[in-house]
Amino acid sequence: MIELRQHLKLTQQLIMTPQLQQSIKLLQLSRLELITAINQELEENPLLEEPQFDDETDGGAEAPEVEALKIVEKTKEITGEGDGKEDFDWDNYLEDYGSAGVTRHREDSEAPAWENMLSRTGTLTDHLLWQLRLSNFSDEEESIAEQIIGNLDAKGYLRATIEEIANIEQVSAEMVEEALAKVQEFDPPGIAARDLQECLMLQLQHMELQNPLVQIIIKDHLKDLETKNYQNIVRKQKVTIDEIRIAVQIINSLDPKPGLFFNEEKPQYVVPDVYVFKMGNEYRVTLNEDGLPRLRISNLYREILGGISESSRTDECRDYVKERLQSATWLIKSIQQRQRTIFRVAESIVKHQREYFDKGIDFLKPMVLRDIAEDVGMHESTISRVTTNKYMHTPRGTYELKYFFNSGINRTDGDMIASESVKEMIKHIADIEDKCKPLSDSQILDMLKKSGISIARRTVAKYREALGILPSSKRKKYF
C-alpha cells in the first residue's frame, strides 16, 4: 500500500551569497585581471566612478583615500526600505561635480595631440613587403612572394609547402621555387627557410664564406653538433679537432631564428602586489596600491534616489539605481577584503620565513599552506587562492607568493631543508664545476650527501631539469 506522508526535517546548508561568490572570484584574480575586472565594472555600472583628486589637498582636509574608505564603511546593504538617502552622505562630495557633471576639455591645453603619441614598430612582414616593393618582380611573382611572406612564422621559417602555395596561386611548383629563391635573398639572411639546415646554409651563402668543413657539418653532422659529439666528426671527416673548433665557432655565430629580431611581443613585467622593506631589525609589509583604480559611489544619482515623484516610472528608476548601488557597494567591499587578506597572508609569510630574509636561500624553511592558514585563521583553499599569481617584492628579489611554500627534504641529522634550497645547491654545484669535465647526476648526488642531504638520483635529475641545466654530456666544453 502506497501512502503519502509529510515529514519536517531540520538541516544546515552552506549557501554562497552573490557577495561571497564575488569575493572569492576577486581573491584569485591576478593584479592585471583585477584591474581589467574593475574597468569593466566601471563601464557597466553607472554608480561606480574613479575619483579625480588634485595632488594638493587643503590643510584641514583628510586624505582622499581615507575619505573614500569612510564612505564605504558607512554604506549599508540596501533592503528596499526608504528612499536610499540615509545610506550615503551625498553632500560631502557634491562639490566634486559641476552643475552638468561633465568635465570639459580645455581647447587651449598645451598637451600634445593623441595622434602624435602613437607609435608602431615595424614587423617582419612589413620589412619583407617593403623589400618586395623595391625588387624587380613580375606581377605573378609578386603575388607568389606575398603568399610566401604571409606563411612565415615568428622565427622566419616557411610553414607552407611549395605544393600548397602553388595550388593557392594556381601556378607551377617551379615558379614558386623561383619566387622563394628570390625571397630568401631578402634581409635578414636565412629568412623563408624550410628547416634549420636550409636557414644556416642561406646565411653561409650571404657571408660568402670559403670553408667547406662548415657546410659539411651543417649538411651531415647537425645531430653530432647538437650533442657535441665532435670526435665522431673528426673520425668521419679525417680532420683535426682545431679545424672542428674553428668551424663550430663560425656556426655558433649564425642566427637559427632570424625572424625573432622583428618580434612584436613585448616583455611582460611583473608588478608586485606586496612590498617588503627592512626598517631597522624589522620587516614591514606594504600593499602596492599603484595602478589600482580607487572606486567610490557616484553622487550624480542623488536626485534619482531622493526623487519626489511617486510615478511607477520613477519607482523603476529608483529600483534600478538601488540594485546598481548594492552591486557597487559589494564590489568595493570585496576589493577591500581582498587587499586585507593578501596583506595578512604576506605578513604571515614574512614571519615564518624570517631567517630566509635575514640569511638567504639556504635558510628557506619547508612550509605548506596549512601553516599560514592556521596562523591567519583561514581555510587552506583561501590561502591557495591568495598565493596564486600574486607577487612579493623583497630585499632578496621579486617572487611569487607560492615560492615560499616548499616541500621538506630530510637531512641525515634529522632536520628538514626546503626543496628550493636543494635546487639552489644543485645550481651552485653546476656553476662552479669544471666545464671540461662536468659532473654527472650521480656525482652531484654524492656531493649533496656530503652536505647531509639524502635524496634519490632521479630527484637530482628532476631538479636539474627544472632549473634548465643540461645533462653532463651536453654541458661539456671541448674548447
Image (spheres, grey):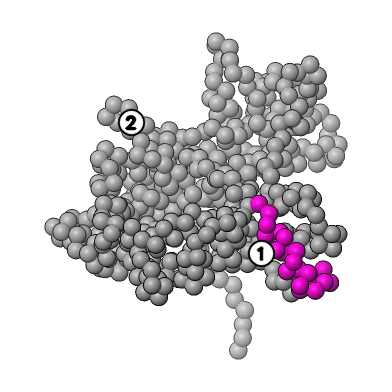
Q: Quadrant of the N terminus?
A: bottom right
Q: Residue 278: which disc?
A: 2
Answer whether residue 337 is visible to the viewer in this image: no
Q: What stretch is highlighted in magenta?
A: 169-187
Q: Quadrant of the C terminus?
A: bottom left
Query: Which amino acid type corresponds to the residue marked 2 in the rendered image?
Result: Lys
Residue 105 location (% of width, % of height): 78, 22
Q: Is mark 1 on a helix, strand or loop?
A: loop
Residue 385 location (% of width, % of height): 47, 52
Q: In this view, does 91 lie above or below 349?
A: above
Answer whether residue 282 is visible to the viewer in this image: yes
Residue 341 location (% of width, % of height): 45, 42
Residue 24 location (% of width, % of height): 53, 50
Identify the residue position indicated by label 1 in the image.
Answer: 158
Q: Foreground: 237 or 458?
A: 237
Q: Foreground: 402 or 395?
A: 395
| Image position of 123 (left or right of 134) | left
Q: Foreground: 160 or 441?
A: 160
Magenta segment includes 381 = no
C-alpha separation, residue under disc 1 versus residue under disc 2: 53 Å
Query: Which amino acid type corresponds to the residue marked 1 in the rendered image?
Result: Leu
| Image position of 255 (left or right of 313) | left
Q: Is the magenta stretch mostly helix, strand or loop?
A: helix
Query: Image quarter for residue 331?
Result: top right
Discs 1, 2 touching: Cβ within 8 Å: no
| Image position of 53 (left or right of 218) | right
| Residue at the extreme front | 210
